[in-house]
Image (cartoon, rainbow, N blue to C red):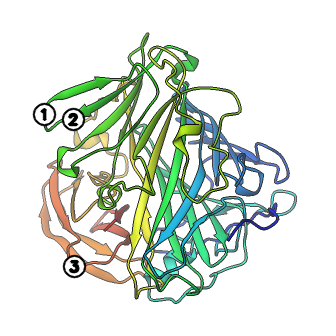
Amino acid sequence: MRRASPRLLAALVLACGLVAPVRAQYDATVDCAATPTGHVEWPADDPVWTFDFVRPGNSVGVDGSGLELRDVYYRGHLVLRQAHVPVINVEYDPGGCSCFRDWNDEETGFATDGIRPAPQSCFADATPGAVQTTCDTNQQGGQGGNPGSFEGVAAEDYGDELVLTTHMEAGWYRYRMKWHFYLDGRIWPEYSYSAASAICTQYGHRHHAYWRFDFDIEGSDGERVHEINPADGTTLTFTTEETRTWGDPEDGVYWEVKDDATGRGYEIRPSSADLELPVDAFSKLDAMVLRYHEGEVDDGSPDCAINPAALVNGEGVEGTDVVFWYRTGALHPAGNPWQCDIVGPMLVPLGFGTATEPDAPDAMPAGYELERAQPNPFNPTTTVRFRVAEPQRVTLALYDALGRRVATLYEGYAEAGRRESVRVDGSGLPSGTYTVVLEGETVRGTTRVVLIR
């Protein structure tokens, strides 16, 4: 399944969900034919994030690299020079369909609203919760097919989270790629694997996407990469290029990239979904630490499996400009061709500082606070905290993507200013995006949670 001619297409699809419409609380300039394709500043009035993006059809690499980011700034600090997925592959169980090196530059249709007119028609200012890809419809009981015709990039602004989505195809596969940006500096790069037809997907197989994060903290060449193992209390500082694995998932291994001069940087923390597919002879690695070289964006290999030997050659990486590669994989068992698997690490900021959180009731101009769930994404439980400025009876409930209430999380009297911590248990629920809704006599608010199995 080698690549067909790359298509330079663009589109986005959004559909109205539980969340009340929140339109374009960001600035975005777009030129569908250009590289980069667009520039985003969010929030519009006082940007926390600014970055350029490149649509899949224009992305770099032998096989493209999906929804590519460039020159990403958090609160005025450069954190990523480039971030994308230059390598994606799949391997089948014996008796299946062998293996493939797939491509990340063929855009395909998905559903959205808010599509801009030409010449910016590859970008959609979507109603939050409206984007539907094959992954979404398959999770809701669908059996393949594209849910819409829009091709390009869609943006959803949830107030405390900005999400960019694109939808790609490689033969019968449908790949969804999202970038989630949070006001507290976190980034969730999400990759999802699904299918539009069952030519081979009824056989068991394993998907792998290899993220390339060109961290460039403050534009410095003085970066260091550390591997932290909480189980044994050790920290490894890399001095030369290496491939790594996280070993026993129970150890909780993660990595961090930090700038020597400022101490600022990012942790790369595997999600529980990432840890479910251990490294093997085909996938070869969970992480790779490389010294930056201009133009070195993929392994250049025509083979199915990634070829780390083309990239790792023993160069020094201590106190230099480094590039961090990270594998996200998913097992797709036989007999379930329409499964959607959602994977991706959480990038957590270090050394940027956080704002002090006010505790007084009069510090709640909306009359309430509904905090983001922690952790989020989660499996199988997470915690949501809320408080109200005026005493009243409230209900906190969980709704699925179709707007159906699936759980009542809290129901009762809430005192003014008192924080309530509420546990969300997803043990009996399928993977997907859910909305937590707070409703009272004078308040109504929402926040999203993502359950990954």
**Relative to the observer, which residue lies in front, 376 or 292?**
292
Quarter-of-image position of residue 81: top right
For badge 3, the amino acid type reads Gly
Q: What secondary structure is marked by label 3?
A: loop
Give percent across and percent down for residue 381: 20, 63
Give percent across and percent down for residue 305: 54, 56
| Alpha carbon separation for disc pair 3 and 1 | 34 Å
For badge 2, the amino acid type reads Asn
Do the numbered discs 3 and 1 sit on residues whose CB atoms are within 8 Å?
no
**Relative to the observer, which residue lies in front, 253 or 453?**
253
Image quarter hosting the C terminus: bottom left
Residue that badge 2 annotates: 229
Give percent across and percent down for residue 51: 63, 38
| Alpha carbon separation for disc pair 3 and 2 | 31 Å
The residue located at (38%, 78%) in the rendering is: 333
Horizontal side of residue 257 vs 235, given as left or right: right
Residue that badge 1 annotates: 232
Give percent across and percent down for residue 330: 41, 65
Q: Residue 99 carries which label?
A: none
Do the numbered discs 1 and 2 sit on residues whose CB atoms are within 8 Å?
yes
Q: What secondary structure is marked by label 2?
A: strand
Sequence-first disc among 3 and 2: 2
The residue located at (52%, 41%) in the rendering is: 308
Sequence-first disc among 3 and 1: 1
Residue that badge 3 annotates: 428
Q: Visible in this render: residue 425?
A: yes
Horizontal side of residue 117 vs 345, given as left or right: right
For badge 1, the amino acid type reads Asp
Crowd rating for badge 3 (residues with CA inside 10 Å; few <14, some 14–19, many 20+): few
